[in-house]
Amino acid sequence: MNLTERDNKVTWHPFRQLKNAPPLISVEKGKGVYLYDAKGNRYLDAFSSWWVKLHGHANEVIARKIYEQCQRLEQAAFSSCTHEPAVELAERLLKHLPGFSRIFYSDNGSTSVEVALKMAMQYHHNKGKKVKRIIAFENGYHGDTFGAMSVAERNVFNLPFSPFLFRVKLIPAPVKGKEGKSLQMLKKLLNGEPAIFIYEPLVQGAGGMVMYEPAILNRMIGECKKNNCITIADEVMTGFGRTGKFIASDYLKAKADIICLSKGITGGFMPLGVTACTANIYNAYMSADKSKTFYHGHSYTANPLACAAANASLTLLESKHTQERILAISVFFERMKKQFQGHPALMDCRSLGTIMALEIRTKESTSYLNPLSEKTAAFFLRRGILVRPLGNVLYFIPPYCITEAELKHIAAVTKELLDEMVNGLKNKRTVKPPTTHRKK
Ligand SMILES: *Cc1c(COP(=O)(O)O)cnc(C)c1O
């Protein structure tokens, strides 16, 4: 039995239909932007393995720091202990998050959101108030745990659980043309009563890399500030340089009260979540009254290995070289956007920083279930590129170590796909064999 056959008998994969799913890729190793299968085929990881690989696979600097940390301290209960990697990481993160005062650790993006929601709810509670309203954007995604599902659009991801999710007021995301409506609806919901507003700043990731402008979000956060509404910026996808700045909120003047970080935080080596909050939030818990304690924690809270990986990843991210690469990718995608804008196979084409999204024209619904996702993924895979489209939205979010030549290859395959879609079968060209598919 080969690996996928053995896998087929014993595991259950996330987000995977049990019938008719495309075959799994049996990955043997990774290096830089590439993953390698047992036959030596290599695949350019153009979605950074679900948006986590900032510096590519098997980065030696991060690997070494984890190994060194393993030999010193691998785990200690953060409820009773503290340790250098966690404190160092908090100090360094707060330097990047002016206005924030505390770092709360958890294990992943969903838990960072759970922590944020609970932190905001109990903030009001500790002040003797009841939360009247939780507000979120339509088409948002914040993770797969119950709180995170509750603040998302009700859709195919969470339909079976919808009777058990808490109630949330959804307003349209302020995309082009909807800014006014979105702001009006928010204003109507805010009346000074305790509230919470959670949003993905500037880019709705899983919702299809939907983008909107900083100016309108500034105004919305401003309204929340005036109305006793705690704001939560879910930067799980947008953090650590993805949008061209350290976090997407850096494009804004108005600051959130709470920020969620995860995904790229450890360079994609270890699971880790962070919820950062302001002194105002923290101080609501400062009490000798035990009932005002934040009773939330996970077995592996602030795991030293994860924190060591995050410190190493942060050092790489802060380096001049990485910052230059982020800029170069941003410039490339900006050009690529111009190149493809108006292409007859596209409904829209957008980019921000190291994120590039192309919305392919379709007659079917534009949801996650659109079958174009499998077709597009297969087209790219045959050319040695790993993508994971969101329905009819093809996107790239590559590791920062990707080269200009590799970006050009992605753009060339994109062009080939889109042109082929327009020309259809009538004008089928012979496809030249992929140059990056075969290793050595
Ligand atoms: C991926 C994601 C999450 C959930 O993170 P997990 O680590 O997968 O639990 C939450 N919010 C946003 C914006 C995300 O993109």
Image (spheres, rainbow, N blue to C red):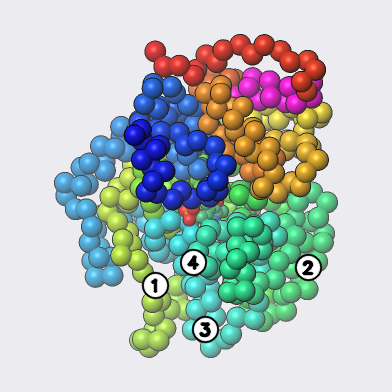
At label 3, counting other C-alpha atoms closer than 10 Å, the crowd grade (few under 14, some 14-19, many 20 or more) is: some
Instruction: Tell whether 68 sits left or right of 109.
Output: left
**Is residue 176 rendered to the left or right of residue 234?**
right
Q: Is residue 107 above or below residue 243?
A: below
Residue type beneath disc 3: His
Q: Determine whether the residue tagged by mark 4 lies in a helix, strand or loop.
A: helix
- Label ID, residue 296: 1
Q: Would you call the spot at circle 2 few (<14 residues within 10 Å), some (14-19), or many (20 or more)? A: some
Q: Let me know if residue 330 appears in the view.
A: no
**Type of residue at label 1?**
His
Q: Position of residue 395 (x, y in %)?
A: 62, 37
Task: Say which mark, if any, is on residue 125.
Answer: 3
Is residue 16 positioned above or below 355 on the image?
below
Please state the horizontal and vertical placement of residue 220, each as a whole percent of the image.
Answer: 71, 63
What residue sits right under mark 2 in the picture?
Answer: 185
The disc, 4 or 3, on the residue closer to the chain's N-terminal end is 4
Q: CA distance from mark 2 to mark 1?
A: 33 Å
Task: Judge whether residue 416 is colored magenta.
Answer: yes
Asked whether the residues under the numbered discs 4 and 2 touch, taking CB atoms below 8 Å apart as contact, a structural biologist would say: no
- Disc 2 residue type (three-letter): Met
Residue 410, picture quadrant? top right
Q: Any mark on residue 114, and which? A: 4
Circles 1 and 3, Cβ within 8 Å, touching? The answer is no
The label on residue 340 is none
- Residue 4 picture location, percent across and down: 40, 37
Q: Which residues are magenta?
A: 410-423
Question: What main secondary structure does the magenta stretch of the protein show?
Answer: helix
Q: Nearer the viewer, mark 4 or mark 3?
A: 4
